[in-house]
Amino acid sequence: MYKYNEFDENFVRERVAQFRGQVERRIDGSLTEDEFKPLRLMNGLYLQLHAYMLRVAIPYGTLNAAQMRQLAYLAERWDKGYGHFTTRQNIQYNWPKLKDVPDMLDALADVGMHAIQTSGNTIRNVTADHFAGAAADEIEDPRPVAELLRQWSTDHPEFQFLPRKFKIAVTGSSTDRAVTKAHDIGLRMVRNDAGEPGFEVIVGGGLGRTPMIGKVIRAFLPKADLLPYCEAIVSVYNLLGRRDNKYKARIKITVAENGLEKIRDLVEGRFNELRREFNGFDQELLENIEAQFAPPVFRKAPTLAFDAYRAANPAFRSWSDTNLADHHADGYAIVSVSIKKHGATPGDASADQMRVLADLAETYGHDEIRISHEQNVILPHVHKSDLAAVYEGLRDADLATANIGLVSDIIACPGMDYCALATARSIPIAQEIATRFDELKLEHEIGPLKIKISGCINACGHHHVGHIGILGLDRAGVENYQITLGGDGTETATVGERAGPGFSADEIVPAIERLIDAYLGIRASGDETFLQTYRRLGLAPFKAALYPEKEAANAA
Amino acid sequence: MSRRPFTPKVVTANELIDGDAVWLTALDSWSRDMAEAELIDDEAIAQDRLLFALSQPDVIVGAYLADAKASGNGAAPVHFREEFRARGPSNYLHGKQVGVKNHV
Ligand code: SF4
């Protein structure tokens, strides 16, 4: 897997040393908060409701065991023994002390990690398909490209002061597991008619205040043209993007206001100039990076032990039905470890759990770990004959919840329990929904269903693309939860439709229960998912279930 | 038309080193317990106290005036955001709800 070269390492160490000096000057009073704030944000340090928060980048969601152990060490040494995995494949520490942060950053640098460009109007951490390098349906591992983009964008002098933050996501298969259509630039790998791999380039997607599904600016871009093309997009945006109004500054607004055609013409024009300047060094770099992402040597071995354990152990059978995905190598499986135990905080893992994950990855998983934007942890390469041992290890660490993709596998942002921008809480709502459906013992019956919760309009919890989205708002000093339905974050991305008036914190869980009851009553068969039923029948039957009083009043 | 009555205020901020929510007391110190906050009934005094807070950038960060009310126990929050700040997160018994020393 990718290792820092010397330049990277020096760069990161230098940044930590600088920041150490800045923190000292802040504490002794020689820097004011106004002077210090942009400096701390550049290093991923936020001030939240109860404490500082350190956001650490996990580039394209990839970690090895040593890095995961170091994350555990940080959690234990400088935080309250846990970390929070986010929808941007980052990890956040909720309780660091200002004076300790430089030491935390040094400890991260020891394992080639940092918190740079996790904030500010720069190109943020590039996210990727969490099944990268493993998925059966993959064309190519998207991470070398993500790493190339990371190197190109890190400290890029032209792009440190963009009109607004800029997020890129990349997926190596035409199945979109990286929500590419909700990013400033989305890259979805496809093949052209000649069978060569390249990218469908999507631009101008984004959630937040004005949710938009990205538009295809180039149906097929040869892989070799990626960097000049992305640079062309970012430089057109850097010129055209609005700096007068923060809410109109993202590229999605630039595209909407100028029209896709105009943006495309400008980008193609700029691309033709840039392509000459790039003259191949990026391809050499990419080749170099690709060599470092060489797949592990997969083992050939029988999988009979897996079948036998499956037959003998119903809990394992249930877990393997929901938490495994198809691997491209024979005899292997992708393990999704649920960080969504019923009633627990979505995405929170304790230091002990992180260490167990590291050990299992090392022993059974070719030393590879991924963090998904759905706030789960992936062991991408596990041979089926080792699944029983992996399952038992997970179970002993309280990590074997069999709910991937089900109603309790909820995305929830930190909301008003931590986030200074929040308008309502999201974590307790996720906890209550998961607990309720666990009591009802219905979640396997309900089948695939994505609930996503955000604690404010910024939509870090991706509520717009949840099959059921929940947005927490402040309505006249009371927490209020608005429901959207029919959202989808995959290659058939759709922004959910608002269902109607919001619900109070006490009403929201029963409302979700009515929705799901309604679905179970009207689905065409047990195989028709919630989203399919919604697409077939539209909002009306769900609205009737959500607002029965209105229904009664209309009938009267 | 009468002026809208002034909602009583407290001066609140986050402590510089650990970021914990703190409130300005009548004794010019900072407390981690909202009940000990000075409840200010007068707009001019509130502004004055805020300026006093802003003059201490080496002790606190991000001082502002928050609506508050009197309770049997001292100053109490009006808005739920301030209630959470005064208590700590709801998913774990972390932060001030587990009991901390009061003064900065
Ligand atoms: S959606 Fe809002 S509340 Fe949630 S993490 Fe993002 S900014 Fe904070």
Image: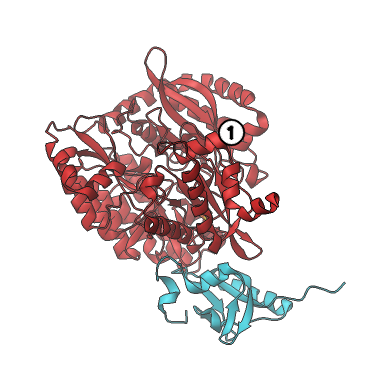
> Which quadrant does the N terminus of chain B fall into?
bottom right
Instruction: Estimate how packed mark 1 is, as few (under 14), some (14 to 19) or many (20 or more) residues with alpha carbons within 10 Å.
Output: many
Say if B89 sits above or below B36 in the image.
above
User: Is A147 left or right of B35, judged from the image as shown?
Assistant: left
Please give the name of the residue rendered at 43% of the width and 37% of the height, measured from the top-left corner: A525
- Chain letter for the red part: A
User: Is B52 left or right of A102, judged from the image as shown?
Assistant: right
**Shade representing chain B:** cyan
In the structure shown, which secondary structural element does the residue marked by tag 1 occupy?
helix
| Residue A276 image position (x, y, % from top left) | 47, 19
Residue A198 visible in the picture? yes
The chain letter for the residue carrying disc 1 is A
Looking at the rendering, which quadrant does residue A92 occupy?
bottom left
In-front residue for pair A62/A387: A387
In-front residue for pair A422/A225: A422
Q: Which residue is mark 1?
A: A237
